[in-house]
Image (tube, rainbow, N blue to C red):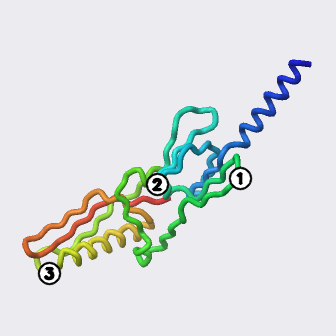
Amino acid sequence: MKKTLLTLLTALFAITAFSQNDKLIKHNGEKLEVKVLKVGETTITYKYPGEDAEQTIGKFAVASITYGTSGRKEEISEKIVISGEDDWEKVQILTDKAQVIGLKKGEDVRGKTNGLLSYNTAGSADKKATRRIKEAAAKTGAPFILLTSDKNDGFGVKQSIKNGTAYTY
């Protein structure tokens, strides 16, 4: 009798523990059963059930979290859909590598202004280079760019060069 009671209690505990998992939904459609430990400014830290190793994912990769203990659903980030080069304004430029954890690395992109014969102010050169790198990412369907270099040159004539890596869901 004691053995049966112990088995039932163990099974009940296992079912209860399993149902307490949080559901993390990624923008790529993947659903993870995890225990969310921390939702930070740019990342989410979690563990898989039965494991001690902490995992980290950038918030841009995550659509929502449904907490197992309360059932509360928290929207994390909105999915950015890029249909082509015309959507360049939707592209986000990121500067922290942690923000792209969980996203898929794409191709390198570049945006620059013309050099010698174009007379740009520092501000206009930067705006043109930003637009061009965003257009390059949008052309590949990528909603994010991890900026790897941002350089302004010129001897009275301003030139801006921006390099980065495109990321998708």
Q: In the rendered structure, which disc, 2 or 3, sits on the residue that comes first in sequence?
A: 2
**Gap between marks 2 and 3 measured at Cα:** 40 Å
Residue 99 lies in quadrant:
bottom left
Task: Give residue 77's position: percent from left, percent from top.
Answer: 53, 62
Extreme residue in the right direction: 1
Q: Amino acid at mark 1?
A: Gly
Left or right side of 97 for 45: right
Q: Which residue is mark 1?
A: 71
Quick one: label 3, few (<14), some, or many (20+) residues within 10 Å? Answer: some
Q: What residue is drawn where x is 40% and y is 57%?
A: 106
Q: Which residue is mark 2?
A: 41
Q: Which residue is mark 3?
A: 119
Task: Give residue 64's position: percent from left, percent from top.
Answer: 60, 57
Left or right side of 25 for 71: right
Query: From what the image shows, is residue 97 above or below residue 118?
Result: above
**Gap between marks 1 and 3 measured at Cα:** 58 Å
Q: What residue is drawn where x is 46% and y is 54%?
A: 41
